Image (cartoon, coloured by chain):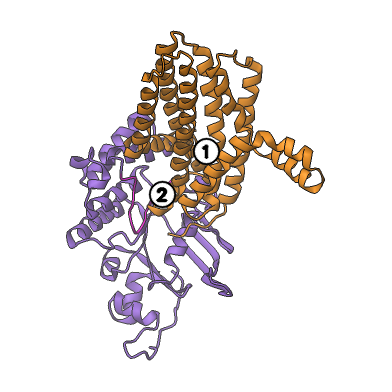
Chain colours: A purple, B orange
Amino acid sequence: MISIVAPILKTENLRVEFRSKEVGGGIKVALTGLNLEVFPGETFGFLGPNGAGKTTTMNVLLGFVNATSGSAHLFGQNVREPIARQRIGYLPEQTYYYKFLTAEELLRFYARIFNIPKAEREKRIDEVLKLVELDHARKRQIKTYSKGMQQRVGLAQALINNPDLLILDEPTSGLDPIGRMKVREIIQRLKNEGKTVFFSSHELGEVETICDRVAILHQGELKREGRVADIVREFNCDLEQAFLRIIGYTPQGTPMEIPTQSHAA
Amino acid sequence: MNTIQAIAIVVLKEMIRRKDFYVLFVITALITLLMGSINIFNDQSIAGYLKELALLLIWVSSLVMAITTTARQLHAEKENRTIFPLLAKPVSRAQLLIGKFFGCWIACGLALFVFYLFLGLVAASREHTLEIGSYVVAMLLHWGALAVVIGMALLGSIIFAAPSSNGTICFVVAVAILTLERHLNTVALHTGGIVGTITYAIYYITPRLDWAFDVREFLVFHNPMPVFAVWFQAILFYGAYTAVLLLVAWLLFRRRALNT
């Protein structure tokens, strides 16, 4: 018996073009023909070198940027509709929140946006603050927090609505080893709870440990999509080496031979 | 509605926790108090002039407060990148704009209430009479006019790149409307031709902030206030004008790309 599970994140032939701000700069293609599907319960790594189009894809998924052509859907809703974002949590790469608010006030503000009833709201705030280990600092203004603490407030706000899908943009970037480990532990715990996590990262060791599937983007194009184990087996090396070979990087500058993709995952 | 209210509350909290808001507040209160305590040549009518000056000061302070706080709202959201986690939630850009508008407008309303109350008490101590109804009408019209100014500053924050340029342009436009608009129809009548037509067009397009501004005269000279129907229509006009400004702001903002 074949069970058909609908993807909760789907892009079809997604293309994004930007008009250059320079005079006569023309049009820059940031993404071309991107087809992605992420299924419930998956931890999906979204990889690529800087400028590959990862953040642009996330910007489209979150409604910050409109696609030039193609479509993107979250939970079957077009990403242009605010309702598509009702069941997601988003952690940006650089976390900046209203620094004049305390963590508790910030979470209460976001909880109100999700229309979480008052009694449940306070319970949920307690839960997420405990999860990110910020319960002791809940009444302090965010401007007094360290970078690691701010990143954890970011995670707390991303979890306030108990989302089914988490979109994390380089969640461990710029953190010290302890901060990175704490964030990784939280992601692992969310994965164990059956949440779907879609995240971009340059920490390929971390991706190899946590992710079920990955997509590798280069110069706006999807180069490879598949199960981590399959990619590692196919290239007979770790994910980092496989990644470098997929994007065609060699220290000498001579392109490597890339195995052709045999199947779509 | 919950979203708009939540955004407005954050705007209010920001203003309450910012120190520059209080500086303007304290300066205006001090000058009003100082003017109220002056007694020149034992002249009782001096109270009228002092009241006029104090009202002018309140107008200038309220314009500065409304424009500076509103002009920086969207810029600060983008600059501090707080707009990204916010719009990644089920928040439409229209809700963001309306929430910001109400936050700024309510903050200005609270400040106006304190200013007028303070002025009323200082003036009453000199004149031994307090026309509460007149102060309420003057304050409501003033608050209505500020809604237009705040709408203008929000629209400007989408058009102009920097909050400083937006603030300056909004302030110049608001002062120009307050001082020159009432003369535009006379100028148009005397000029005639294309220039006259353009002047008439400007006269009819620009919001009549001078209606609220001129109400100062009623307070100063103890004239009876306009009847309810008149000032209520003026407030409705300000409401409609603000709605148009916010609509234009939303039309410009709704498709604008926000790159993280």
Residue identified by numbered label 1:
B150
In the depicted view, which residue is nearer to us: B22 or A241? B22
- x, y percentage for residue A56? 46, 64
Quarter holding residue A117: top left
| Image height of A239 relative to A95, above or below | below
Residue identified by numbered label 2:
B76
Q: Residues within 10 Å of mark 1 (few under 14, many from 20)?
A: many
- x, y percentage for residue A66? 55, 58
Q: Is residue B124 magenta?
A: no
Q: Subunit of mark 1?
A: B
What distance separates the C-alpha of mark 1 from that of mark 2? 16 Å
Are dots 1 and 2 in contact, CB under 8 Å? no
Comparing labels 1 and 2, the label whose residue is closer to the camera: 1
Residue B179 seen in the current view: yes
Amino acid identity at mark 1 = Ile
Which secondary structure type mostly characterizes the magenta part of the structure? Answer: loop
Q: What's drawn in magenta, residue-wise? A: A87-99
